[in-house]
Amino acid sequence: MTHLLCDAGGTHLRFALSDDYVSTISEPQKLKISDFQDMNDAILHFLNSQQCSLETISSVRLSFGDRNPWIVNPQTIARILPNAVFFKINDFEANAQGIANATQQEFLLLNQPEGQRRSGASKCVIGVGTGLGLAYIIPTPHGSYIQRTHGGHMVPAIQNEQHRSAFLDIQGIKQDKTVMIYEDILSGPGLWNMYTLTIEKAHTHAEYTDTNDMIARGRNDPMAQYVLKLFHEVLGIFVHQAMAFGFAYDGLYLTGGIIDRLVGHNLFDTPTFLSTMKQNNVPLVQKDVSATGVFWVKDEFIALRGLQDKKI
């Protein structure tokens, strides 16, 4: 039985194949959503590249983010994969499932935890990409339980005028006129909006084409440095709240395209991030936060592994 695994975010699709008798997945393939008309178009492209017959696919296991614009359901999939059982979960649930079953060798420790980790605490998974994701890995007597959330859409805690101004500026250009949320800054589009609004205030012009270009080439640019500092400060605040709300002091796991690029270009600002993650809170909370390890998830295809491991 051949299973088609697909992780569909807001910008990219990631595909792989697996079966019931092999513990590993095939070599993953990463595709741009903008290159395809719909999900079926992308599936046909991938399966053709693998020389895989449509009739051999017994299931489609899909992790799907709310930033993906496509309509995907059993009826649409059945048009090209008539023998496949369709299963869909939240993209961040799949990320957390993959992380729950990974080994420590698959993570990079970004800080030096101090003290003993809290017994019985959950793990916190946060991803920054086209959107902002948050999930918890909760220990139970029967294994890990994955709790999905709408955490990226929480109204932010604002600690200084710089943060307030950044959120208000972005809210001013939002077409849907919704309230300020963490994702307005903690995302690829959020970073780009901060940059363009900052240079507009400075009466200068953009040096880059998009967020990825800014991260790749903006190391010595004061404007890029400014928005990246704000980003890491707000990320630390968000993490502090997320850990407190979910009693998640057994490890923080950072993933997503923006995090991957920042780490890859040696631009992840750990000191700034930790300065706001470690709030001047009551001693009990400070102790738990200080004892929490912060890890970067090295495998960008971790959600595909989560889909393979998910009990269906």
Image (cartoon, rainbow, N blue to C red):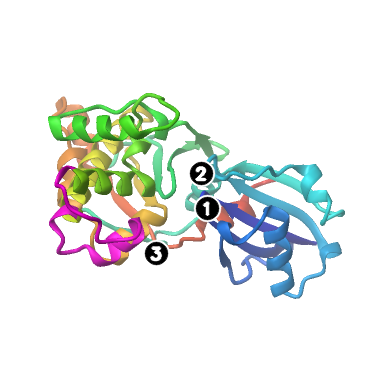
Q: Distance between the Cα atoms at labels 3 and 2?
A: 21 Å
Disc 1 and disc 2 in contact, CB within 8 angstroms = no
Q: Tell me the amino acid under the disc marked 3.
A: Gln
- Precedes in sequence: disc 3 or disc 1: 1
Q: Nearer the viewer, mark 1 or mark 2?
A: 2
Quarter of the image where the N terminus is located: bottom right
Residue named by callout 1 = 98
Q: Earlier in the sequence, mark 1 or mark 2?
A: 2
Please name the residue shown 41% across and 56% down the image. 257
Q: Is residue 115 visible?
A: no
Q: Secondary structure at mark 3?
A: helix
Label count reads: 3
The answer to whether mark 3 and mark 1 are in CB contact below 8 A is no
Type of residue at label 2?
Answer: Phe
Please name the residue shown 34% across and 43% down the image.
190
Q: Which mark is residue 206?
A: none
Give the residue number, with chain letter if any, for mark 2: 92
| Residue 141: image location, x then y, percent | 54, 36
- Residue 100 forms part of the magenta stretch: no
Magenta part of the protein: which range?
201-223
Q: Point out the tag, 3 or 2, that comes first from the N-terminus.
A: 2
Q: Residue at x 81, y 53 (%)?
A: 84
What secondary structure is marked by label 2?
Answer: helix
**In the rendered structure, does residue 210 fall within the stretch colored magenta?**
yes
Disc sitting over residue 105 in the figure: 3
Disc 3 vs disc 1: which is toward the camera? Answer: 1
Circle 1: residue type: Gly
